[in-house]
Amino acid sequence: MSFNPQFARIGEVLIHEQLATEDQIKEALIKQSNFGLKIGETLIKLGYLTEKELLSVLHMQLGYEIVKDSELMDLDVRIVALVPEPFANENRVIAIREEGDGVVVAMADPENLTVLDNLKKLINKNIKPLLAGDSVLHDTIEKYYKSIRTTTQVEDAVGGFDFVAIDDDENEITISQASTDADAPIVKLVNLIINEAIKSNATDIHIEPLTKHTRIRFRVDGALREVMNPPIGMHAGLISIVKVMSKLNIAERRLPQDGHIALKTSMKSVDVRVSITPTVLGEKIVMRLLDKGDFGFKLTTLGFEEEDMVIFKKIIHRPYGIIIVSGPTGSGKSTSLHAALKEIQDIESNIITVEDPVEYRLEGITQIETKEQIGLTFGAALRSVMRQDPDIVLLGEIRDEETADIAIKFSLTGHLVFSTLHANDAPATVTRLIDIGIKPFLVGSSLSLVMAQRLMRKVCNHCKTDYKPTDQEISDCGLTPEEAAKIQFKIGSGCVHCDNTGFSGRIGIFELLTVDAEIRRLIYEGANQDLIREAALHAGMRTLHDAAMVKMKKGVTSVREVIKMTVVE
C-alpha cells in the first residue's frame, strides 16, 4: 500500500521523507508542551528541521500552496491594512492580495477555522489561505504594519501643518508653540523619525533639503536607505525643533553647529550627536545615535579568523605596549577595543578610558568623557589618568602629537595602551604616527600591534543564493578565471527579512601587523610604508583584501562587497 501524506500524522510524514528520525520525533513530543509549540515548530527550535522543510511537509499533508518570498516583497498596504495589526500579530496572518470576490492571506496555520471565520467577518469577504513560515510572517507583518503606522503618523503631522510664505530675512517658522506643545505636528514627526531610527538599529539619521521635499535617510548596516519624504515646507520646522532639543542657536542659519541630545526611550537610552551644516538648499542635519546600554560584543563575535584571534589575544594579554586599531569612521574600531578590554578585564587591573564621547558603557571600568568647553581636553584628562594608578589605558583616538606623546609615555612606563587612529591600512598607521611628530625610535620601542579593520555586510541567510560573477567582477577582486571556477559565490536575492537589500548584519575583517624585530628595525631606520608592508607580508600578515576574500569564499559576503570595501594590492 502506497504512503499517502494526507492521511498521515506530520511526524510520520517527516520520517517518511527522511527529514527527521523517530528519536527526534519522540524528543519533540516530550518537549513540545514545555515550549508551548506544535511538533513542527518544536523540531525547528531543537535544530532538527528548517522552516522550509516544515513548509514542504505541511504542503504535502494539507495541500495548501506555499507563499513565494517574491510575493511578499511588494504588497499593497491598503490590502494589508484590511486586517487590523493586533489580529495579524496574534494569529500570524497577513492579507497579501485581492482575488475575485475574496482576499488571499498568508498564514502559519491555514487549518485554524476560528481564525479563518473571524477574518471573514472582519473583512466581509471570502478568505483563501496560503502557507507561510513563522519567521517570514513575523518579518513581513513587522515591515508592512510599521510602514502603515509611519505613513499614518507622517500624514497626521503634514495634515496639521500650515504652510507659510516667508521673506528671506525672517525666521522661517515660529517654534515657541511647537516646542511647548508635545502634540504639535513637527514635534510628532521628529519623535517618529528618532523612534523609527532606533527600532531599525540605525547608526545615523540624515535630514536634508531637496528642491521639492525633505529627504530623510537612515544608515543601517553601513548603507543609507530612504525612509520618508515630508514636504519641503516642513524642513525649517524640523531644523528648529532639533536645534531646540540640542540647545543650539535657532537664529544662526549661516554657520555649522554641533550639539547633542540625551534620549530615554522605552527600549534604551541613546545619546544623539547632532551636526547641522548650511547647504545651498538650506540646513542639513546629521544625527549619530550612540547606544548607552550595556556593551554586548565579545571578541568571538567580531569576525576574527582563528589564527588572527590567537595573535590578537596573545598581544592584548601583554603587560605593556601600544595596540592601535585603525580605519575610517564607522569601521568598528571602538567596538573591537571595548571587546578587547572586556576580554582582559579582571579584579587585579585598574582599567581607565578617555573617550569623546563614551560610546559603550563597561561595568567595572573607569570611563572619562572629555568636555572641551570646560577645559577637559584629551591632554588634561590623560594627565589626570597618570595620577590614577592605571594598569591599562584606552585612549579614544590619537589625534595629535600631544595625545600620541602621552600614549607612548604610558607604554614606556609599563602600561598597556589601546587607541585608534585614522589610516587606510596597518603599515600606513605606523608612518602616520611618525608624521604626527613622534620620533621613529619611540614608535618602534612602544608599538606592539597595529590592526586595520573594516566592516563588511553579510549576505542574508534567508535569501542566500548561488551567484555567477561577471568577468569584470572576477578581475576586480584579483582572481583568475581558474581560481574563480573553484569558488561557490553567494549573493542575497532580497527578501522581507533583509528589507530587500540582500544583506543582513555586518562582520569585521582585520589586517594584523605584529611589530617584530624586523618591523622594529625598519621603523628605526625611517622606512616608508611600502617597505614595512613588504616585511609584514613576508612575516605572514593577511591584508584586508585577503581577509575579505576568506569571508567571500566561505559564503559570508558577496563578491560585490569585496570589490566595494577593499583594494587589490
Image (cartoon, rainbow, N blue to C red):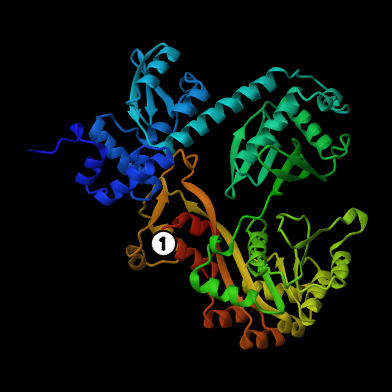
Please report the residue visible at 74 percent of the width from the left and 63 percent of the height from the top.
Answer: 365
Spot occupied by residue 276 in the image (x, y as percentages of width and height): 78, 42
- Image mark count: 1
Asked which quadrant contains residue 152, the reply is top right
Left or right, 144 with reference to 250 = left
Q: Position of residue 414 (x, y in %)?
A: 76, 81
Of residues 274 and 226, the one drawn nearer to the viewer in this rendering: 274
Residue linked to disc 1: 554
Which residue is most to the right?
374
Q: Quadrant of residue 14?
A: top left
Give neighbour class at mark 1: few <14, some 14-19, many 20+ (Cα, 10 Å).
few
Quarter occupied by the N terminus: top left
Which amino acid, by three-letter code, is at mark 1?
A: Lys
Q: Is residue 280 above or below residue 109?
A: below
Give the secondary structure at mark 1: loop
Query: 172 or 65, which is in the foreground?
Result: 65
